[in-house]
Image (cartoon, helix red, strand yellow):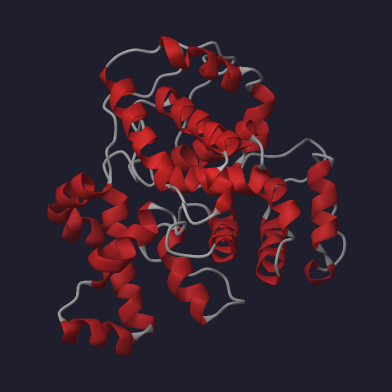
């Protein structure tokens, strides 16, 4: 299962422990159990555009790159010169990692992940979070090798035609006013235009996923954190195409399976809560938690809690 389900159970019970990982047998059982629910859940919670993943219609330096998807996320190396971890891990501070990231001298290793996990659990300064996310997701590399790609997509927006564009763009316009309406920032015309650009650009970049309801909340939080359209776009790309399982939004298979895994974890860590919902005849995963997963906790949790979960998600990836 993805870190999404394990973060909400194991780490909440043990806030300073390694994120729990479900066994592969649990995931396979969940996939089998949820196959009959998948269609209804997908129809209710998402509106993916039809089509196939393609970028070669748009001006890009990325056209010659293959898009490899890895279910077990391994962030790309940040540079050729590694930070030297010659002191015990417990003595490394966030400042040490920050300096190495800024200098492009940090390479992913067990020691680095262990140190970053401790820093994340202790708390990352808000102003440093864009740097952390850019490094962990591999968006920093995408920005380097795809200069001008995002701007090229924006120039193509008015020229793209067809059913996929119409369906995705229409749904985006409907969802923009619904995106955190209680927060003043989301009423700002410039902010909304930037969010519109990010979502539309992604919809034409990856027509297999297009736009799904819930992505507006994810992109909104990304842009609210980074304040940078292009960086938010690339983190979104990495999140949907590399960090999460391949069909998390395109078919909702893994999103539905994660509900079954989450149910198992609730029974394991919170048996009284599980029994309480069973006695009430309430299906917790369908009534409450499905929205948590398809919006990556953005709609149901405060920004601060959501960002902490995302720190761990970007560190651990899909496991």
Q: Position of residue 85 (x, y in %)?
A: 83, 57
- Near-viewer residue (170 or 133): 170
Q: Position of residue 103 (x, y in %)?
A: 84, 40
Residue 85 visible, this orientation: no
- The residue under the point 15% across, 55% down is 37
- Near-viewer residue (261 or 44): 44
105 displayed left or right of 291: right
Q: Position of residue 87 (x, y in %)?
A: 87, 65
- 83 relative to 66, above or below: below
202 displayed left or right of 42: right
Q: How many marks?
A: 0
Q: Position of residue 204 (x, y in %)?
A: 41, 22
Residue 173 visible, this orientation: yes
Residue closest to the far bottom: 272
Residue closest to the far left: 36
- 38 relative to 50, above or below: below
- The residue under the point 58% across, 22% down is 150
- Check the picture and name the quadrant holding the C terminus: bottom left
- The residue under the point 19% across, 45% down is 43
51 displayed left or right of 222: left
- Check the picture and name the quadrant holding the N terminus: bottom left
- The residue under the point 62% across, 21% down is 146
139 displayed left or right of 28: right
């Amino acid at each position: 299962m993805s870190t999404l389900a394990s973060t909400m159970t194991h780490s909440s019970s043990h806030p300073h422990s390694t994120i729990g990982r479900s066994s592969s047998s649990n995931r396979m059982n969940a996939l089998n159990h949820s196959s009959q629910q998948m269609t209804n859940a997908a129809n209710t919670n998402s509106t993916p555009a039809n089509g196939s993943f393609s970028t070669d219609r748009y001006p890009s330096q990325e056209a010659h790159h293959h898009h490899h998807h890895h279910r077990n996320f391994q962030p790309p190396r940040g540079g050729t010169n590694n930070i030297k971890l010659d002191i015990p891990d417990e003595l490394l501070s966030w400042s040490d990692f920050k300096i190495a990231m800024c200098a492009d001298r940090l390479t992913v290793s067990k020691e680095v992940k262990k140190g970053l996990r401790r820093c994340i659990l202790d708390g990352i300064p808000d102003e440093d979070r864009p740097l952390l996310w850019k490094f962990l997701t591999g968006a920093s590399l995408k920005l380097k090798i795809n200069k001008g790609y995002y701007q090229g997509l924006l120039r193509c927006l008015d020229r793209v035609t067809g059913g996929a564009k119409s369906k995705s763009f229409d749904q985006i316009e409907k969802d923009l006013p619904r995106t955190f309406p209680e927060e003043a920032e989301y009423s700002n015309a410039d902010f909304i235009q930037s969010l519109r650009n990010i979502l539309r650009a992604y919809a034409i970049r990856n027509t297999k996923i297009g736009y799904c309801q819930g992505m507006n909340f994810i992109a909104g939080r990304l842009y609210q954190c980074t304040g940078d359209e292009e960086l938010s776009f690339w983190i979104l790309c990495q999140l949907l195409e590399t960090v999460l399982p391949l069909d998390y939004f395109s078919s909702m298979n893994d999103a539905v399976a994660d509900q079954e895994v989450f149910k198992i974890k609730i029974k394991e860590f919170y048996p009284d809560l599980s029994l309480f919902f069973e006695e009430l005849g309430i299906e917790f995963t369908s009534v409450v938690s499905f929205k948590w997963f398809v919006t990556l906790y953005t709609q149901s949790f405060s920004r601060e809690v959501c960002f902490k979960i995302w720190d761990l998600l970007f560190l651990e990836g899909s496991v």
